[in-house]
Image (cartoon, rainbow, N blue to C red):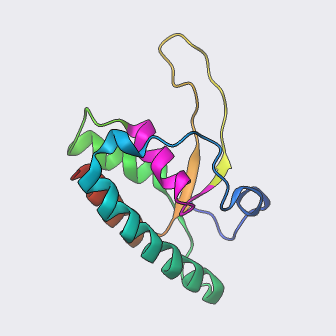
Amino acid sequence: MDIYDSISWKERKFRNRSILPPVASQLGPTGVFHATSTIVEARHRINSARANEEFPPLSVQYIIDQQTERDRPNIDREALFRLLIDHGTVAVHEYSILGRRGEERWKPRWSLPPEMSLGLIHLLMDS
């Protein structure tokens, strides 16, 4: 689990910028509708909390991994990551291109407060 103490320069650089094409349609219309409204609210709460330094962000990748392995092992994790990026809720800390032989092509790490992450992931997986 990765804990970040403050907003890094990479996060500021990539905030509100989509680096991947949208794939929200893969998650289904109901899930996308609920996720969109929740993500907008989450963004507002995140920005307010960060301004007041109420909590350190938690790795969303870790939470998605934990939730999907237990609840939905076949869900498209890449689609979840991309949907979160497209709505500007999470920021890129780092990503790397890995090998092609059975490994992930990209492995981003996102930051989001734990209480926000779990709610968003559950909504996305319920689609």
Span of residues in magenta? 77-91
Residue 1 shows up from this direction: no
82 up-or-down from 88: above or below: above
Residue 41 percent location from the top left of the image: 43, 77
At x 53%, y 63%, the residue is 89
Residue 27 percent location from the top left of the image: 32, 44
91 up-or-down from 105: above or below: below
Name the side, left or right, on which 100 lies relative to 9: left
Residue 10 belongs to magenta span: no
Name the side, left or right, on which 75 lies relative to 62: left
Residue 20 percent location from the top left of the image: 60, 40
Residue lying farthest top? 101
User: Magenta stretch mostly in which secondary structure?
Assistant: helix
Name the side, left or right, on which 42 lies relative to 26: right
Residue 85 belongs to magenta span: yes
At x 65%, y 85%, the residue is 51
Residue 47 percent location from the top left of the image: 59, 79
Name the quadrant containing residue 2.
Answer: bottom right
